[in-house]
Image (cartoon, coloured by chain):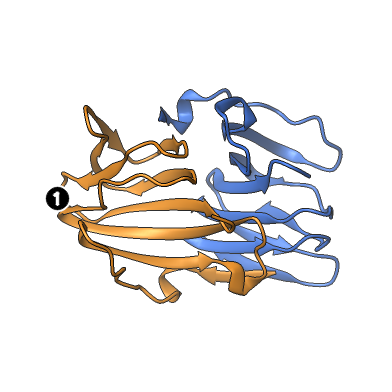
Chain colours: A orange, B blue
């Protein structure tokens, strides 16, 4: 059984266009023997955002801390701590931190994508 | 995109032997179109526990609130808010709330099991 506090996992800066002040930790991944899905914990600074993008795999998201808006190409929805998102394959999505503290959320993706 | 606060999802009492004061919400499941993995949020009262069991699928767990011990048949490890567990297939496991407030954790499982 792997057991770790999420803050003890390396905080990485993804090399992705269209992001601002977004970092993540791969807390459960293929390296741990996970064959079906990976768990990442994101940290987005005030005013920061993940990219507005789409891909052919899903996201399962849980907001741990902070607030913001989830956008697609036509609309946006406010979110807060405790909110859950299921982003289907090929849905456009972006998470923007509109609050004053670090936005933290869990985002799970399939290993095979 | 499904978007819901986890407390707005029905809190269910599982019909499982060997549990005490354990309830859960299926916040993302096959009903939402999830084909790879399901997200549940558990709530375990003080002194409560999930079953000591094993099965041929994995768990990915994130502790949202509270404290407790994770047990298998031979040892136990204390955990706290922000801890992450990867329980491999066939590993024995049990989560016990040893604190004074409700233990809340996310637990993900594969859809096909």
From the viewer's perspective, tell me whether residue B74 is left or right of residue B87. right
Q: Residues within 10 Å of mark 1 (few under 14, many from 20)?
A: few
Quick check: B23 above or below A57? above
- What's the residue at 46%, 36% (across, down)? A88
Give the x, y percent position of residue B54. 84, 55
From the viewer's perspective, tell me whether residue B91 is left or right of residue B4. right
Give the x, y percent position of residue A94. 27, 44
Quick check: A83 above or below A46? above
Which type of secondary structure does the marked residue at label 1 adopt? loop
Chain of the residue where label 1 is placed in the rendered structure: A
Give the x, y percent position of residue B42. 60, 41
Quick check: A65 above or below B74? above
- What's the residue at 55%, 43% (across, down)? B102
Dot 1 corresponds to which residue? A100
Which quadrant holds the N terminus of chain A?
bottom right
User: Picture quarter containing residue A67?
Assistant: top left
- What's the residue at 16%, 46% (across, down)? A99
Q: Nearer the viewer, residue A25 or A58?
A: A58
| Residue B70 in view | yes
| Residue B81 in view | no
Give the x, y percent position of residue A108. 50, 52
């Amino acid at each position: 059984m792997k057991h770790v506090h999420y803050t003890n996992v390396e905080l990485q800066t993804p090399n992705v266009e269209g992001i601002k002040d977004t970092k993540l930790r791969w807390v459960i991944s293929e390296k741990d023997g996970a064959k079906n899905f990976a768990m990442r914990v994101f940290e987005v600074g005030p005013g920061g955002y993940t990219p507005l993008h789409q891909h052919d795999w899903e996201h399962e998201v849980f907001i741990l801390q902070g607030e913001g808006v989830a956008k697609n190409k036509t609309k946006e929805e406010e979110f807060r701590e405790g909110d859950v998102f299921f982003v289907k394959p090929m849905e456009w999505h972006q998470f923007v931190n509109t609050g004053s503290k670090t936005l933290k959320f869990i985002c799970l993706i399939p290993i095979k994508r």
